[in-house]
Amino acid sequence: MSRLIEAKGLSAGFGGTDVLSGVDFHIDGGEIVTVVGPNGSGKSTLMRMLVGALSPRAGRITRMPGLRLGYVPQRLSIDPTLPLSVSRFLDLPRPAGRAAKAAMLERVGISALADRPLAGLSGGQYQRALLARALLVDPHLLILDEATQGMDQRGSADFYALIATLREEMGTAVLMVSHELHVVMSASDRVVCLNGHVCCEGAPEIVSSAPEYRALFGTGTHGA
Ligand code: ADP
Ligand code: MG
């Protein structure tokens, strides 16, 4: 199986504050990996370094040559209140063909919404539009940072079911950051628990019983 991204000894910080130190991380083709950790533990910072949006203070990141990344950031740099239709939004940052856009909206289940203003979508519809945009590059790896934040339980279950289907159909590896530990634990091949450094990682059942994990999240299924 091909290694898509490998990171060694990553450190990150802002001003005088260290956010991450000594983080080793990798993801292979087809894997579903979830990063969990308390608020402010450096999850989004790690994602931004992996996609190349932020330079590490130390360490190095190796990406498979030609790696195509679909990235749904936690906070989008595009103002969601801009008067922009869903279809036009899919042209950012680069124009996409009409047929490709229509097919992708169909795939994520919002084909009827192509001409709607982006600002008029519900939270779940909006996240699906972001997902469609990320999928347009035909990614080897999809990175989703808190993609179901603000959705109700049903909405987020539907969203993760869609991700599982897409992974089956397209063979895309998925790296997600999630607060919804109950979902994560059943849907991931591997879980990485972050708290400024990697405190534990492995198969979901191993991580959920690790003392380092329990110290952060307790023994319940909800947390963070
Ligand atoms: P998480 O995603 O795990 O909640 P983040 O990676 O977003 O955490 O943030 C980790 C820490 O780094 C937080 O304390 C946050 O305030 C800080 N931080 C993140 N981005 C910046 C930035 N651009 N400038 C200054 N501090 C930042
Ligand atoms: Mg975050």
Image (tube, rainbow, N blue to C red):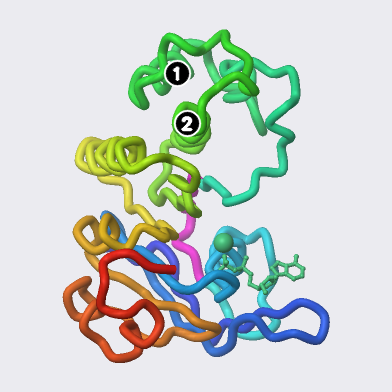
Q: Residue at x 64, y 49 (%)?
A: 75
Crowding at mark 1 (Cα within 10 Å: few <14, some 14-19, many 20+): few
Name the image quarter holding the C terminus. bottom left
Q: Residue at x 36, y 17 (%)?
A: 106
Whether residue 98 sits left or right of residue 91 in the image: it is left
The reply to whether callout 1 and callout 2 are in contact (CB within 8 Å) is yes
* The image quarter in which residue 88 lies: top right
Q: Which residue is mark 2?
A: 136
Q: Quick one: 55 or 42, which is closer to the camera?
A: 42
Question: At label 2, which amino acid type do we have?
Answer: Leu
Q: Can the viewer see residue 137?
A: no
**99, above or below 150, in the image:** above
Q: Which residues are magenta?
A: 62-70
Q: Which residue is mark 1?
A: 100
How far from the left and from the top, in percent, is residue 143? 46, 52
Question: At label 1, which amino acid type do we have?
Answer: Ala
Q: Residue at x 29, y 91 (%)?
A: 211
How far from the left and from the top, in percent, is residue 90? 57, 25
Tag 1, which secondary structure?
A: helix
Name the image quarter holding the N terminus. bottom left
Give the spatial CA distance, label 1 vs label 2.
Answer: 7 Å
Q: Residue at x 31, y 84 (%)?
A: 214
